[in-house]
Image (tube, rainbow, N blue to C red):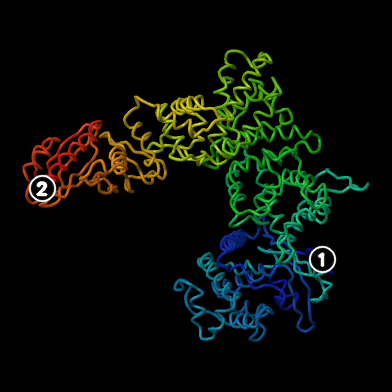
């Protein structure tokens, strides 16, 4: 083996070996593929920046890292790259393009032509080789400014075969040439810089494996599986090189031998860490590259310093799963720093301590499920959320900070606090995450005694919801005051819907207000017991009402209707008011009502307490709720309409109502007035009339007409078939009454019919004539009209 790691440029490589041939075992050229757009653009930008710098710039040459391979043959000699195929192919294409830009075909030909053949070739496919032969002999006559798309110019040439459309390497080359044309069309003099071997602009480290050919020896030496290095193996090699170059006195004692950080990481990756990820390998090829790279990204994410100017960009890139970050990102962005390495070692050593299975560090999974998070990281199906990022950060940073110098209960208590704070802090923007990570790091020094820290009123806790911080302070004082609180709070916090937010229970049991009167540290054992008993009672009732994902629905909307009998509990949502939904993240959720973070929601939370005070969870809850509803009286009209009409709730799929300036209350099928909507009072009346329609014969209650938009209001018709034609009356709600408008009249209105209509308020029998009826009188008026019409029918 010679010239280990020797810096060299593309021209010098060709001059040394005469030819470059991509061996048959390599894949097709990929940098031009559509899904590689970001990688392609970043690489071309880096090349452009290097070429446009002055030749004496201290930052040059721009080094493309290792390219290694073997030589084969004698005359001619061919260099066969094992790693570097993509970079070499792009450099070849850039040489061809810049030769065109700078009219340097003579120099280009001397470097890359051998007669009619290309000195850069692909053995992967014969068609690829033929294309490269044709390309090196193609000197476009068109002017650069007249060529909009370079690929279109090439495929229009007589030497371009139609069958080449099926060659993925050729199609990728055409795409890359278009990208090069876009970036370099206005350049000048860059071919000379590209081929300058005295002061080169772009180089790579050549690892020249002389005389190995393509024998098994080469692959065994480069990769124990006898295959080209995978993406992770390349990453690992480069990362280890960075570690070797980093000055550090830190060492690890292994079997009596002192290892450097680089040696230790290399050893662990090949042994214990590899065993850990083996279960997550891809069964098709037995590779676990994706799994371990995903963990690397996770560790890089949680070790970024929130004080750094690039934190928001870094965290966004590392949370990305559609185009996950690779080595170039880790290297150029500085993610492979000492905090990353320290945390990586701490985490993977802890996880791999028992061999091939995950070694969990926590005594329970209530607040941080290590098995779930491990699978979540190694096989991501969605982007990690902000709250999950905070929780993962709390977990990894604790392990890194304290190593093995902690007790499991200390770790559990820390993760409990991290979970509660992060789950109940709103994250709308990346800087919300940054603020929480900053607050988390400030708490880390106190992590092993986190309850003591929170109990101290002088301690500073930032970056999270103040309301949740205050809740955690109270709970810390309660736990330290009496151990009976520990299991009780855990039971409440780990409920699937409450998720650490249980201030409503502390409020209802009296602990929230009592602490303002007497400091918790001064409470007697009896005082603790009394509050714990009340807390336990309200928890049992709350668990009766709420399941793991929201409200435990009962028939006929019993919960919502019974709660309304105690008052208006609705929460605002944009221009609407909501009967509340389950989704915790929404501003009109039951979770938000329980949170009570605003004056109006805290007041409404009190209504829920009044309802639960009426219930005995040991009895039949549905029967008790019906009794609450049946005994309700003196309700506001709109509340009464809702309480007496369970069918109303089914119409409102998103549980939204809208009040307008004229006093109308609309039931929204979804959330907007431009969608279908009904009107509360007319809808409730219609459903009631339909349910007892026989009582109103011979009047017919026609179907309710809901509407979209604001051109007309919802309504329904009541009709009567007279001997001379139909009578139809349109019923709508108007502020505090109903309007009855004659929509259709018989051809001839008899005197008895006219009298009947006059008796219910119509001043005439003309179409459009109206009568206005108080809501409380509406059913009686219709009964009266039905009776009169029935008498007319009997006299016919």
Residue placed most toward the observer, 292 or 238: 292
Outermost residue to the right:
256
Looking at the rendering, which quadrant does residue 781 occupy? Answer: top left
The answer to whether residue 121 of the structure is visible from this angle is no
Query: Residue 152: x and y, percent?
Result: 48, 76
Return the residue at label 2: 796
Q: Nearer the viewer, residue 149 or 755?
A: 755
Q: Identify the mark at residue 224; answer none if there is no mark.
A: 1
Q: Position of residue 153 (x, y in %)?
A: 49, 77
689 sits left or right of 750 in the view: right
Mark 1: secondary structure: loop
Do the CB atoms of the residues marked 1 and 2 lie less than 8 Å apart? no
Q: What is the crowding at mark 2: few (fewer than 14 residues within 10 Å), some, or many (at least 20)?
A: few
Label 2 sits on a secondary structure element that is loop
Q: Position of residue 507 (x, y in %)?
A: 55, 23
Crowdedness near tag 1: few (<14), some (14–19) or many (≥20) residues, C-alpha within 10 Å: few
Closer to the chain start, of discs 1 and 2, is 1
Asked whether 620 or 330 is in front, the reply is: 620
Q: Residue at x 25, y 48 (%)?
A: 702
Residue 266 in view? yes
Q: Nearer the viewer, mark 1 or mark 2?
A: 2
């Amino acid at each position: 083996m010679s010239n280990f790691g020797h810096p060299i440029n593309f021209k010098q490589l060709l001059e040394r070996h005469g030819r470059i041939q991509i061996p048959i075992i390599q894949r097709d050229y990929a940098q031009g593929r559509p899904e590689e757009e970001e990688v392609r653009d970043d690489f071309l930008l880096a090349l452009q920046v290097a070429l446009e710098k002055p030749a004496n710039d201290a930052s040059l040459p721009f080094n493309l890292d290792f390219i290694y391979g073997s030589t084969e043959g004698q005359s001619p000699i061919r260099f066969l790259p094992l790693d570097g195929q993509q970079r070499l192919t792009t450099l070849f294409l850039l040489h061809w393009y810049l030769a065109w830009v700078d009219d340097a075909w003579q120099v280009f030909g001397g470097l890359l032509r051998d007669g009619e053949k290309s000195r850069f070739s692909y053995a992967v496919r014969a068609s690829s080789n033929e294309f490269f032969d044709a390309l090196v002999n193609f000197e476009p006559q068109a002017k650069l400014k007249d060529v909009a798309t370079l690929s279109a110019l090439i495929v229009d040439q007589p030497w371009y075969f139609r069958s080449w459309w099926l060659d993925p390497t050729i199609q990728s080359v055409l795409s890359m040439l278009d990208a090069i044309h876009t970036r370099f069309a206005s350049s000048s003099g860059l071919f000379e810089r590209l081929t300058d071997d005295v002061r080169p602009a772009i180089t790579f480290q050549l690892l020249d494996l002389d005389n190995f050919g393509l024998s098994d020896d080469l692959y065994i030496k480069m990769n124990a599986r006898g295959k080209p290095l995978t993406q992770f193996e390349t990453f690992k090699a480069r990362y280890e090189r960075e570690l070797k170059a980093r000055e550090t006195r830190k060492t690890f004692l292994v079997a009596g031998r002192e290892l450097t950080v680089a040696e230790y990481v290399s050893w662990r990756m090949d042994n214990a860490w590899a065993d850990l990820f083996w279960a997550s390998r891809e069964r098709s090829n037995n590779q676990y590259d994706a799994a371990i790279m995903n963990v690397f990204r996770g560790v890089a994410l949680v070790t970024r310093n929130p004080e750094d100017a690039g934190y928001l960009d870094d965290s966004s890139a590392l949370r990305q799963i559609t185009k996950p970050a690779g080595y170039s990102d880790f290297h150029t962005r500085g993610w492979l720093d000492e905090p990353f390495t320290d945390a990586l070692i701490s985490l993977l050593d802890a996880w791999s301590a028992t061999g091939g299975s995950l070694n969990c560090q926590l005594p329970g999974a209530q607040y941080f499920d290590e098995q779930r998070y491990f699978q979540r990281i190694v096989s991501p199906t969605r982007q990690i959320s902000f709250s999950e990022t905070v929780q993962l950060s709390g977990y990894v940073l604790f392990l890194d900070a304290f190593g093995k110098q902690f007790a499991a209960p200390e770790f559990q208590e820390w993760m409990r606090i991290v979970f509660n704070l992060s789950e109940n802090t709103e994250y709308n923007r990346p800087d919300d995450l940054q603020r929480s990570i900053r607050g988390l790091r400030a708490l880390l020094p106190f992590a092993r005694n986190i309850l003591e820290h929170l109990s101290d009123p002088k301690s500073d806790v930032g970056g999270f919801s103040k309301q949740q911080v205050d809740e955690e302070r109270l709970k810390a004082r309660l736990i330290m005051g009496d151990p009976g609180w520990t299991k009780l709070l855990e039971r409440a916090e780990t409920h699937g819907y409450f998720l650490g937010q249980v201030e409503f229970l502390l409020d209802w049991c009296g602990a929230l207000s009592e602490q303002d009167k007497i400091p918790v540290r001064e409470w007697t054992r009896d005082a603790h017991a009394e509050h714990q008993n009340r807390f336990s009672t309200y928890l049992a009732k709350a668990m009766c009402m709420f399941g793991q994902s929201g409200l435990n629905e009962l028939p006929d909307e019993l919960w919502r209707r019974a709660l309304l009998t105690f008052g208006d509990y609705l929460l605002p949502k944009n221009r609407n008011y909501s009967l509340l939904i389950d989704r915790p993240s929404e501003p009109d959720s039951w979770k938000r009502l329980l949170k009570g973070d605003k004056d109006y929601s805290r007041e409404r939370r009190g209504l829920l307490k009044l309802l639960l005070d009426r219930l005995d969870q040991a009895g039949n809850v549905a029967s008790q709720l019906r009794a609450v509803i049946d005994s309700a009286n003196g309700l506001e009209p709109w509340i009464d309409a809702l309480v007496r009409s369970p069918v109303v709730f089914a119409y409102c799929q998103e549980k939204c109502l809208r009040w307008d300036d004229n006093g109308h209350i609309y039931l929204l099928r979804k959330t907007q007035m431009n969608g279908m909507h009904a009107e509360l009072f007319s809808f409730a009346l219609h459903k009631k009339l339909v349910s007892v329609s026989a009582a109103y014969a011979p009047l017919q209650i026609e179907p309710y007409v809901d509407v979209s938009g604001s051109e007309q209001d919802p309504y329904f018709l009541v009709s009567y078939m007279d001997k001379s034609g139909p009578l139809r009356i349109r019923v709508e709600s108007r502020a505090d009454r109903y309007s009855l408008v004659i929509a259709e009249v018989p051809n001839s209105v008899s005197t008895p019919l006219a009298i009947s209509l006059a008796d219910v308020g119509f001043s005439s029998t003309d179409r459009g004539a109206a009568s206005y009826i108080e809501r409380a009188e509406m059913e009686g008026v219709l009964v009266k009209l039905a009776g009169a019409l029935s008498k007319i029918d009997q006299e016919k």
